Image (tube, rainbow, N blue to C red):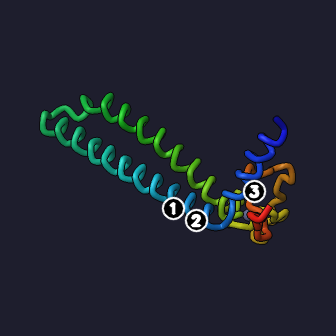
Amino acid sequence: MNSFFDKIKQGANIVSDKAQVTIELTKISTQISSKNKEVDKLLLQIGSEAHQAFRANNLLSAEPRIEEISKQIAVIQRDIDILEVKAKELKNEKECVCGKIVALDTRFCPVCGNKFDPQVTVVDAIPSGTQTVDLDK
Ligand SMILES: [Zn+2]
């Protein structure tokens, strides 16, 4: 039983190598760009709704629809934010409150001096050394 879980753990470690990180980052950036396209589409819809209401001489009639679409955009935007944080973690980076991107293990921001919470840990941290698998065994 134990060795079964050990194997799963080992497998997880093996896939978190540099090549896998690149694959993950590509996946995330594809997701981000498709979500950005969704946002663009919704923004166009807002414009169209507003213009139709304008032509009907009743701009305010578009408001409920615009509010609804704006909420959809906010949800997608939040997903994008989460994906961006994930991408930074994969690259071993984090963002300071001031906007500066620093290495994940940085304790003080070089720009604003902000002290980072040392308790922050990243799930599936990328091992710094190269892992080799002994296939001969
Ligand atoms: Zn800072």
Disc 3 residue type (three-letter): Ala
The CA span between labels 2 and 3 is 14 Å
In the picture of the structure, the residue carrying the numbered disc 3 is: 125
Left or right of residue 50, residue 126 in this image: right
In the picture of the structure, the residue carrying the numbered disc 2 is: 22
Classify residue 6 by image quadrant.
top right
Query: Do residues under tags 3 and 1 come within 8 Å of each other at their CB atoms?
Result: no
Query: Do residues under tags 2 and 3 come within 8 Å of each other at their CB atoms?
Result: no
Q: Which residue is drawn at 81% across and 65% down?
A: 106
Disc 1 residue type (three-letter): Thr
For mark 1, does the 10 Å Cα neighbourhood hold few (<14), some (14 to 19), or many (20 or more) residues?
A: few
Q: Which residue is drawn at 32% across and 28% down?
A: 64
Classify residue 127 by image quadrant.
bottom right
Task: Mark 3 or mark 1: name the one nearer the start of the chain.
Answer: 1
SS for callout 1: helix
Query: Do residues under tags 2 and 1 come within 8 Å of each other at their CB atoms?
Result: yes
Dividing the image into 4 quarters, which one contains the N terminus?
Answer: top right
